[in-house]
Image: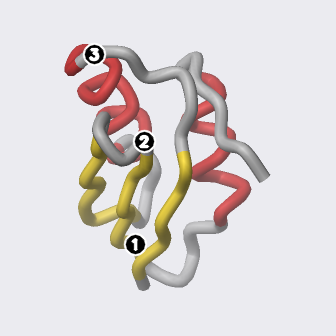
Amino acid sequence: MKTLLKIEGMTCEHCVKHVTEALKGIRGVSSAKVSLKHKNAEVKHDDSVTVEAMRAAVVEAGYEVPA
């Protein structure tokens, strides 16, 4: 599966790395491509991963996922 998340609060490449690591840390996520320019993340994952889990990981990392 593929999910596109909007992410607010990223200001630099360090932020991108931080969000990428947070998303890849979720069991079932195979890849996360985070874009500072587009303020989003394209996450490839299996069916066990919920949008809520991805949101929680991004928020825990210090960023926002608008509804």
Q: Is residue 29 above or below residue 58?
A: below
Q: Which residue is mark 2?
A: 39
Q: Quadrant of residue 50?
A: bottom right
Q: CA distance from mark 1 to mark 2?
A: 19 Å
Residue at 42% across / 34% down in the picture?
A: 22
Q: Nearer the viewer, mark 1 or mark 3?
A: 3
Disc with the residue nearer the chain's start (1 vs 3): 3
The answer to which of marks 2 and 3 sits earlier in the sequence is 3
- Callout 3 environment at 10 Å: few (<14), some (14 to 19), or many (20+)? few
The residue wearing badge 3 is 12
The answer to whether the residue labelled 1 contacts the one labelled 2, judged by CB atoms less than 8 Å apart, is: no
Q: Of the residues tagged 1 and 2, which is closer to the observer? A: 2
Judge whether 10 appears above or below 28 on screen.
Answer: above
Tell me the CA gap for discs 2 and 3.
11 Å
Q: How is the image coloured?
A: secondary structure
Location of residue 32 (image quadrant):
bottom left
What residue lies at 43% left-to-right and 79% top-to-bottom? 46
The amino acid type of the residue labelled 2 equals Lys
Q: Residue at x 42, y 85 (%)?
A: 1
**Crowding near the residue tagged with mark 1, few <14, some 14–19, many ≥20 C-alpha atoms within 10 Å:** many
- Please, what is the three-letter code of the amino acid marked with disc 3? Cys
Secondary structure under the numbered disc 2 in the rendered image: loop
Q: Secondary structure at mark 1?
A: strand
User: Are the residues at dot 1 and dot 3 in contact (C-beta closer than 8 Å)?
Assistant: no
Where's residue 35, x and y in %?
28, 44
Q: Position of residue 39 (x, y in %)?
A: 42, 42
Q: Regarding mark 3 in the picture, which secondary structure is present there? A: loop
Which disc, if any, is residue 45? 1
Q: Is residue 29 left or right of residue 35?
A: right
State which tag comes first along the sequence, 1 or 2: 2
Q: Is residue 29 above or below residue 48?
A: above
The amino acid marked with disc number 1 is His
